[in-house]
Amino acid sequence: MSFSDSDSSEESDLGLLKKALDVTLPDDFDPNSVPQSGVEFLQHVIFERTQCKQWVTATKDFTKYNEKQNVHVHQGVDVPKALQKFYPTKQWQDKTINDLTQLKTYIKNSQTFEPTKIFIRRGNFFDRLEHGVAPPTLSEIGQYCQSAKVRMFSYMTEVLEDFDPLMGISDNLGTWAYGLLALLEKPLTPDCCFQLREFAKKCASIRASLGENIDNRIAIPLNVFICIVARCYDQLDLLD
């Protein structure tokens, strides 16, 4: 049994947007007539839908509720600003997304990565990041279910709390992060979206803390992760 969140080939053919019945309005349609069959009833439904406005707005005055408002929602996210030399170019970002897209296409076509209900303990994952003999392979990462991958992002965000700007992103963490980003399935659950954003925001915060004397190459993996989360997973408010 597969624990992948993606739909099967049969399920992918279903959905609310797929036309169930091919019913159209005839040229001599009379909206005042009484439906005599199921088809005529649907024709009336179609006609009534054409009479509805595409957008409907409320005209009620809501200003009287302003004094009673006790919850304020902040629009957008203030991404910490970094030195200009650490920001990627548009061309570089396009190439990064293109490379990831090609990898995702390869993974999809190869059909060799079948997620199962495998989880990893927090301590074991930290040990793999710090003392792993070799970075993980795509086939290894592909064995973890979606919820396990999401949990790994929360672990990596914790690891980045102790980021050393002189050492940069370790090979292990970089491989885990890139592999997980390549194997995440869409649409994202709320928890997955939150953990991805926290990971990307932590990368942006680290990048903003880098000083003028830090080598530009230290920011490259940070830029890769921010770019992929923002553009591939539609978190555009985090985009550079």
Image: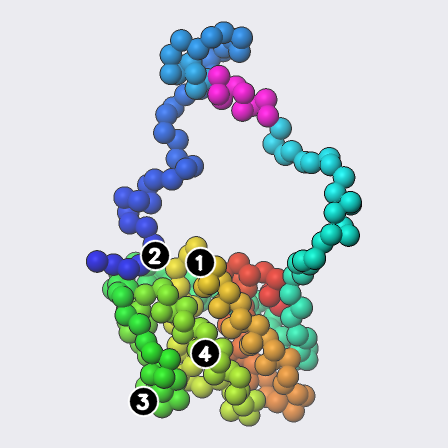
Task: State if disc 2 and disc 1 touch (CB < 8 Å).
Answer: yes
- The relative height of residue 83 versus residue 35 in the rendered view (above or below) is below
Residue 230 forms part of the magenta stretch: no
Give the magenta range: 44-52
- Judged from the image, the secondary structure of the residue bearing numbered disc 3 is loop
Pointers 3 and 1 in contact (CB under 8 A)? no
Q: Disc 3 or 2, which lies upstream in sequence?
A: 2
**In-front residue for pair 158/239:** 158
**Label 1 belongs to which residue?**
189
Q: Amino acid at mark 3?
A: Val
Identity, as a three-letter code, of the amino acid under mark 2: Asp
- Residue at the disc numbered 4: 156
Q: Residue at x 64, y 84 (%)?
A: 209
Which residue position holds label 2?
5
What's under tag 4, amino acid-wise?
Met
The three-letter code of the residue at mark 1 reads: Thr
Distance (Cα) linking label 3 and label 1? 32 Å
